[in-house]
Amino acid sequence: MTERPEPPALSSGRLQRSELFAASRSLGVPDDYGRTRGLRRVREARALEHIGRDVQGRDQWLAPRAARAWERMRSAAAGDAIELNVISAFRAISYQLDLLRRKLARGQSIEQILRVSAAPGYSEHHSGRALDLTTPGFAPLEEAFEHSAAFAWLRVNAPRFGFRLSYPRGNRHGIVYEPWHWCWHEKPRTP
């Protein structure tokens, strides 16, 4: 019998979240980041369900209803001979802060980082509703994913399962085009 993996630790408590936001600001995230980017702070998921492993073999998690929608969508895609693979799902605010620190340590500027990643506390990944996806033959987190059959399938079918492309070209948030980033919303948008 295989052991069930432990869910990731949440950045619980108002004080801890406050400390994480202060740490973000100390690293260069502007005080008015949310307002100028049109982004709201995102609460971390209260409950998480294991959705399997990502392309690097790491356990991944989503909020329960998003996890069920993902499973239905992945199954429907497979029925159409489309393979959808997870790159990333839930991320705690503390994980997003560590990601920011690692990118700064590699010499990226805060401006460069915030064009490709939401600041800690503002990422849809915190909600447990967002997925970064890929498919065989396409490098993870690359714009070329938009030329895949998987992306074409998602554009047509993801809304049926409540998933939306969060960062289309020219989005108002100043985040680069991310054809791989899809977020589940409780009520699907009607066309």
Image (cartoon, rainbow, N blue to C red):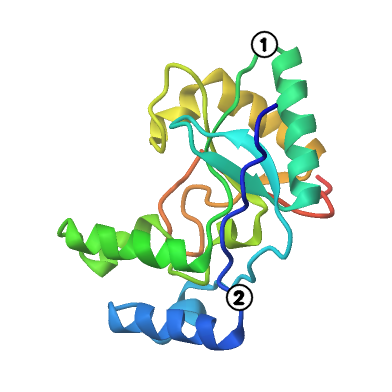
**Which numbered disc flags the more N-terminal residue, 2 or 1?**
2
The residue at the point 48 percent across, 18 percent down is 136
What numbered label is drawn on residue 12?
A: 2
Q: Mark 1 belongs to which amino acid? A: Ala
Residue 119 vertical placement versus 153 (above, below)? below
SS for dot 2: loop
**Circle 1 is placed at which residue position?**
81
Q: Residue furthest top?
A: 81
Count neighbours of disc 2 (C-alpha within 10 A) and say few if under 14, some if 14 to 19, many if 20 or more.
some
- Residue 30 in view of the camera: no
Q: Mark 2 or mark 1: which is in front?
A: 2
Q: Residue furthest left?
A: 107
Q: Nearer the viewer, residue 121 or 37?
A: 121
Q: Is residue 180 left or right of residue 81?
A: left
Q: Position of residue 119 (x, y in %)?
A: 43, 68
Q: Is residue 8 left or right of residue 74?
A: left
Q: Position of residue 11 (x, y in %)?
A: 55, 72
Q: Position of residue 185 (x, y in %)?
A: 75, 54
Residue 58 vertical placement versus 170 (above, below)? above
Quadrant location of the N terminus? Answer: top right
Q: Is residue 77 left or right of residue 26?
A: right
